[in-house]
Image (cartoon, rainbow, N blue to C red):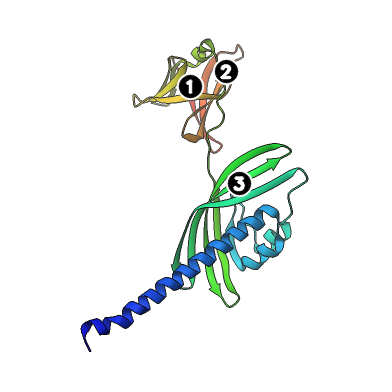
Amino acid sequence: MSRHAALLPILLALCVSARANDDVAALIKRQSQEFSDASASGDAKVLGKYLDDRVLFMNEGGDMPTKKEIVDGAQPPANGMTNKLTQENFKVEVHGNVAVTSFTDVSTLQFHGQTVHAKYLSTEVWLREAAGWKMISSQTMAAQDDPPEATMSVWALDEYVGTYQAGDFTYRIERTGDGLTGTAQGGKPVVLKAELRDVFFTPGAPRIRRIFQRDEHGKIIGFASRREGHDIVFKRVG
């Protein structure tokens, strides 16, 4: 038998294995989208069908409900509301009897005539069981978006210009044209945008807000750099 002939069965086996993984990937993608659809519509039957009894499930709020809690809590949207979840950037890796996915759920919520869009980043783990592929783990986090920008006059922005300190850490706010910039410890300036009066954010960094404090006379005396509800307090020194 030639060397090439000896390699043929191995190559065929590899092709069959790759094709099997492709088939599994397509199945998992379909089931995952069906699960998202059921989550949006409150379809308890589909949720129960795909969840393993011991699933470890963390939603975007950080809660970890059991399968029973997920299924029992499934409800259709209230009157005047609809929600659609469309998966994007879907990736799946098959490791024998285990499939691991990552994707973005794009939510389109209709709320009494208004449309709200949001994105959720998810990973799921599926296990091949006797009854088919079941979800054994899921973790979701809400994608952060910049808030709408509020319009403020130049004279109003000038109130925030100054030097602020947290211990020996210095933060300088300056007006540049009709906007503000903030510079930490003499570093590179970043743009500050008003979300509303006394609340500012930097585009592309929506996890952080700078919330300014005033004294009883309305003068700005400092700000809190707030991230996920936790504050670092800066006092105005100049």
Residue 186 or residue 72, whichever sits in front: 72
Q: Residue at x 21, y 83 (%)?
A: 3
Amino acid bearing label 2: Arg
- Can residue 170 be seen here? The reply is no
Q: Position of residue 162 (x, y in %)?
A: 44, 16
Tags 3 and 2 touching, CB below 8 Å: no
Q: Amino acid at mark 3?
A: Ser
Q: First in sequence, mark 3 or 2: give its number.
A: 3
Please tell me the numbered disc located at residue 214. 2
Labels 1 and 2: the sequence-earlier one: 2
Above or below — where is 78 with respect to 29?
Answer: above
Image check: 30 left or right of 76? left
Q: Residue 189, image x and y in percent?
A: 38, 24
Q: Element type at marker 2?
A: strand
Would you say the residues marked 1 and 2 are in contact, meaning their CB atoms lie under 8 Å apart? no
Helix, strand or loop status at disc 1:
strand
**Residue occupying the far bottom of the picture:** 1
Q: Is residue 33 above or below residue 16?
A: above
Q: Is residue 136 above or below residue 176?
A: below
Q: Nearer the viewer, residue 163 or 18?
A: 18
Q: Residue 131: horizontal and vertical position, in percent?
A: 61, 76
Residue beneath the point at 58% across and 73% down: 132
For the C terminus, give its image quadrant: top left
Q: In this figure, which residue is indicated by the disc labeled 3?
A: 107
* Mark 3 or mark 2, whichever is nearer to me: 3
Q: CA distance from mark 3 to mark 1?
A: 40 Å
Amino acid type assigned to the residue bearing label 1 in the image: Lys
Q: Residue furthest left?
A: 2
The answer to whether residue 67 is visible is yes
Q: How many marks?
A: 3
Q: Viewed as shown, does residue 31 lie left or right of 192? A: right
Q: Which residue is mark 1?
A: 235
